Amino acid sequence: MRNYRVLIFFLLIPAGCVPIIRKTRVLPDEIDNRVYRRLAGRKSFAFNVAYHTDAPVLLSAHSRGVWQRPDREAWDGFWIRGGQKNAIRMRANGDVQFFWTDSGWQIQPRGLESKILDQLEQLLADVQLSYRGEFAGRYRFQFQPNMSLIDPLRQKNLSGILDVDIHSGLPVRVYVGDPERRAEWEARFSGFDRKVRVEIPFVPVLRLELAPERRLRINERRLVSARLQHRLRLMEIGCRQNWEKGNLELVLDQVLSRTAVELLTCRGQVELWRGRWVKPGESAGGRVVQAGIDAARRVELLERLGDNSQLQAEVDTSIPLQPKLTVTGRFAFQDSSSYILLADQRVLGVTEIAEPLDAGAVATRLHFSDSDGPDILRTIQMLFSVPPLPVSLRVISYERR
């Protein structure tokens, strides 16, 4: 009897209670020539690019690849010119790219050939999309493209087609060609947000030898290696480590200035103080430290405001020649105060540029600038996010390759 009651209960559930799932749709009017930016908002996607042209020479290529946020790409395929077929194996990250050659991976500044989003941006720059209808779950648009790759002499009557998924608004196909099909370029996009990892080749460009300030036990060496690895991972720098006769050999795949290396390998106890400038010949009641290489530039430390665990830092490089470090913390804002940033008792910067973040002036943001370049500020930012090393490491060899 009990089973019958259960059955009757389910039979009596109204059919209207079953939810109907409908996918949302993007409207055609929401799609413009900046549609490629929607790809940059994904975690990853796969792409397939092919093209051919007959001018100024016979040239064709075909590549499959993967894009991974924030800016990693893998390209694999081939290109044919004058009947000669050549392999394409390329990886890119940030502002560098790697080509596979007979002698191994070669590193060089990154170009347009390894930037799929930049290729789309160039193709669609200043074009007007003309809606042509819907088919097979896609919106189709037509446009007049900017495509110097397959028509460098601007002699062909090229037209373009853009297909966009009606639900996600993501571009799934871009095609450019002339009526005679003597020149064509096509890119297809799929595999959005899949779990992928683009492995970047390790090409050593900087070799360091580091000496700890005292002899380390085995467990201390392991801790130093692990924390250095963590620091470099936050900076997206690849490394290789080897302990030899008490010293650490560290090989990096990116160049850092010597000053940045010294910050990378310092113990890394970051502190923020409120203080004041001390005039030459003036005495001070508190602790005084030298700010920079000029012995006459001194500051008195009056109030400790926080350390690694209590502060947050970001680097602003929007103005390349004027990079800034922004430090935020829970401390009272005081107008006309000097703020001193220290790492292992060494002054990293002094600023009077501060702003309150709330009505009670309990949270404060500071702005530090540094003329030595963004790599130093990026290294300082990293120190805010990691625990200190058990010891500092002295740079005894700095060798660029």
Image (tube, rainbow, N blue to C red):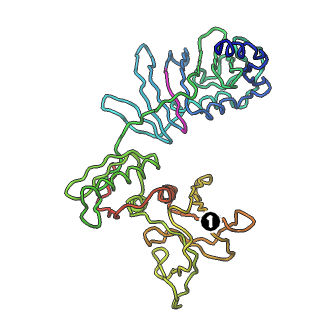
Work out whether 254 lies above or below 165.
below
Give residue 127's position: percent from left, percent from top: 73, 27
Q: Viewer-proximal residue, 77 or 328?
A: 328
Quadrant position of residue 331: bottom right
Quadrant position of residue 190: top right
Name the amino acid, label 1: Arg
Identified at 71% across, 22% down, the residue is: 167
Horizontal side of 205 relative to 317 (left or right) equals: left
Q: How crowded is mark 1: few (under 14 residues within 10 Å), some or many (20 or more)?
A: some
Residue extending furthest toward the left: 245
Give residue 397's position: percent from left, percent from top: 29, 59
Q: In which quarter of the image is the N terminus?
A: top right
Quadrant position of residue 357: bottom right
Residue 65 colored magenta? yes
Q: Main secondary structure of the magenta part?
A: strand
Give residue 133's position: percent from left, percent from top: 77, 14
Horizontal side of 247 relative to 49 (left or right) equals: left
Q: Viewer-proximal residue, 127 or 240?
A: 240
- Mark 1 = which residue? 330
Work out whether 181 lies above or below 364.
above
Horizontal side of 237 relative to 146 (left or right) equals: left
The part of the chain drawn in magenta is 63-70
Identified at 45% across, 17% down, the residue is: 80
Horizontal side of 121 relative to 258 (left or right) equals: right
Residue 317 colored magenta? no
Give residue 53's position: percent from left, percent from top: 55, 16
Identified at 49% across, 75% down, the residue is: 291
Identified at 65% across, 23% down, the residue is: 171
Residue extending furthest toward the top: 180
Residue extending furthest toward the front: 1
